[in-house]
């Protein structure tokens, strides 16, 4: 039986979905098929209005790390909703924001930090960019106002975030509105420009970023990167050594290092934060998605105190005049605080690291499959890049794989020619193996039948 309650038959929701809902990152033509209407979540599964259970193989846009319907999170949200629903953080505070900020900084190498709350990842990035540029201006170094990033990085869809995370396929029409940034070549191990094999390079790909520092460090406020994996670019995994060298360049030049952990943080890479792989202590860290276990919108820009101190209002007013209505909302903060408690109590990061090894062992042999260009794994991420094959482009083949897995009630969203798995970190080992086996079989069958 379908989960209750529902007020109308499935056809009512599907018809009105087509008429009235504007779906993000969704092609117009795909509405013809119609979409599952989800009414409930349990663990790694989403359940639609007709009672069909789907395995959420991408953790609902990389956010639901603790699974759907986690009872401790539901209880924390319910309890908070009965006490305080909303209270602003402008010239006011509330216990949830205080407790969350105090707990959050303890996950960092140096807890001497302040936390600026927003509602979503892009907003956390916008705050980080403004903080970095303002920091230098407040120090009387206003010439240091330029930003650097990686080619094909993605940092969100607000205009500042798009400027540093420009992807032509997403943002071409917005180009006239964007500011210029220094953009280093993408450190893409799957398509190494130096022709090196994975794990046998000398990080030659860092030369492009090094050149930017050599020529422009004096005018740079900050560099912002997705750590170790460029998500929207197709789960491009790059070496830890690259991130380590970047941290050293920033340290030597004084350029601030902003690490966007919105997708890669909270255990996804087998560490709490991806920057830990490189033994870094970034100046500014952007968090979101998994911060509340994916249950409610909340994000954070976590800033070292030496930067925060530049925003005093004496002898001149350097107040950070920036904020969002629902930044640090009490209910979302309660969910985030409980999320961090679960991470500690259930040792989620160590569990993700173990499951990640299982996932890599299952998926990596696909590299030998005809029509597969590359397989890359990092923690609880597994990506399979498909080649053009038998008259079909890699992107077309990826959509074929998506449709065939949907028939098996597995939800994926390919990125061009890349099909990838990023399930909840709490998925059972049995379900993870079932998911990996389904992907392997579908890719192999699709290669053989095309």
Image (cartoon, rainbow, N blue to C red):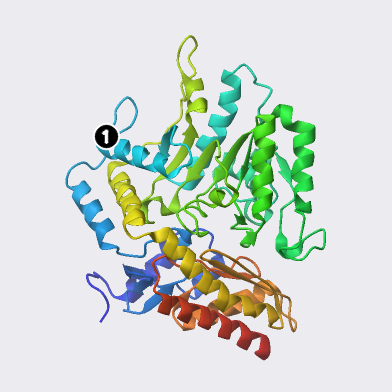
Q: Quadrant of the N terminus?
A: bottom left
Query: What residue do we see at 55% from left, 40% from top?
Result: 281
Position of 443 with respect to 103 (left or right) is: right
Total label count?
A: 1
Query: What residue do we see at 35% from left, 54% from top?
Result: 344
Query: What residue do we see at 35% from left, 75% from top?
Result: 11
The location of residue 100, given as percent across then percent down, is 33, 41
Above/below status of 61 relative to 276: below
Q: Residues within 10 Å of mark 1 (few under 14, many from 20)?
A: some
Q: Is residue 226 visible?
A: no
Q: Depth check: give the residue in front, 197 or 371.
A: 197
**Judging from the image, what secondary structure is the residue with disc 1 in?**
loop
Above/below status of 72 relative to 208: below
Q: Quadrant of the C terminus?
A: bottom right
Q: Which corner quadrant of the image does residue 175 belong to?
A: top right
Above/below status of 247 relative to 140: below
The location of residue 425, given as percent across then percent down, is 42, 64
Q: Which residue is mark 1?
A: 94
Query: What residue do we see at 28% from left, 56% from top?
Result: 73
Position of 399 with respect to 352 (left or right) is: right
Q: Is residue 297 visible?
A: yes
Position of 101 with respect to 218 (left or right) is: left
Which residue reaches farthest top?
Answer: 315
Q: Which corner quadrant of the image does residue 118 belong to?
A: top left
Which residue reaches farthest bottom?
Answer: 449
The location of residue 129, given as percent across then percent down, is 57, 35
Which residue reaches farthest right?
Answer: 194
Above/below status of 219 relative to 196: above
Position of 80 with respect to 289 (left or right) is: left
């Amino acid at each position: 039986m379908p989960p209750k309650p529902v007020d109308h038959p499935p056809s009512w929701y599907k018809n009105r979905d087509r008429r009235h809902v504007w779906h993000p990152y969704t092609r117009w033509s795909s509405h013809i098929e119609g979409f599952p209407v989800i009414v409930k979540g349990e663990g790694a599964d989403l359940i639609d209005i007709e009672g069909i259970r789907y395995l959420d193989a991408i953790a609902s846009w990389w956010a639901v790390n603790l699974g759907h319907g986690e009872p401790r999170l539901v209880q924390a949200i319910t309890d908070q909703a009965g006490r305080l629903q909303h209270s602003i953080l402008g010239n006011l505070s509330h216990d949830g924001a205080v407790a969350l900020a105090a707990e959050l900084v303890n996950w960092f190498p140096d807890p001497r930090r302040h936390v600026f709350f927003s509602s979503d990842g892009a907003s956390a990035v916008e705050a980080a960019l403004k903080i970095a540029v303002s920091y230098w201006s407040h120090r009387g170094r206003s010439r240091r106002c330029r930003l650097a990033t990686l080619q094909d990085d993605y940092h969100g869809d607000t205009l500042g975030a798009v400027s540093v995370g420009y992807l032509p396929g997403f943002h071409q029409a917005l180009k006239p509105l964007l500011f210029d940034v220094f953009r280093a070549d993408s450190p893409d191990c799957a398509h190494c420009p130096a022709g090196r094999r994975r794990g046998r390079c000398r990080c030659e790909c860092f030369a492009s970023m090094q050149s930017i520092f050599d020529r422009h460090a004096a005018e740079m406020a900050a560099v912002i990167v997705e750590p170790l994996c460029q998500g929207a670019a197709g789960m491009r995994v790059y070496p830890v050594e690259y991130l380590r060298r970047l941290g050293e360049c920033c340290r030597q030049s004084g350029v601030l290092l902003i690490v966007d952990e919105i997708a890669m943080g909270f255990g996804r890479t087998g560490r709490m934060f991806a920057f830990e792989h490189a033994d870094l202590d970034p100046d500014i860290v952007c968090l979101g998605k998994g911060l509340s276990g994916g249950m409610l919108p909340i994000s954070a820009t976590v800033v070292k105190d030496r930067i925060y101190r530049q925003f005093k209002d004496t002898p001149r007013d350097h107040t950070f005049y920036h904020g969002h209505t629902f930044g640090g909302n009490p209910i979302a903060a309660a969910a985030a605080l409980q999320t961090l408690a679960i991470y500690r109590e259930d040792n989620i990061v160590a569990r993700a690291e173990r499951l990640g090894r299982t996932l890599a062992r299952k998926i990596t042999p696909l590299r030998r499959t005809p029509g597969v260009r590359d397989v890359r794994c990092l923690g609880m991420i597994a990506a399979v890049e498909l080649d053009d094959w038998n008259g079909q482009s890699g992107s077309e083949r990826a959509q074929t794989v998506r449709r065939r897995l949907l028939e098996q009630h597995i939800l994926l969203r390919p990125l061009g020619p890349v099909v990838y798995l990023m399930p909840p970190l709490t998925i059972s080992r049995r379900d993870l193996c079932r998911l990996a086996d389904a992907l392997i079989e579908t890719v192999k069958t699709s290669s053989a039948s095309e």
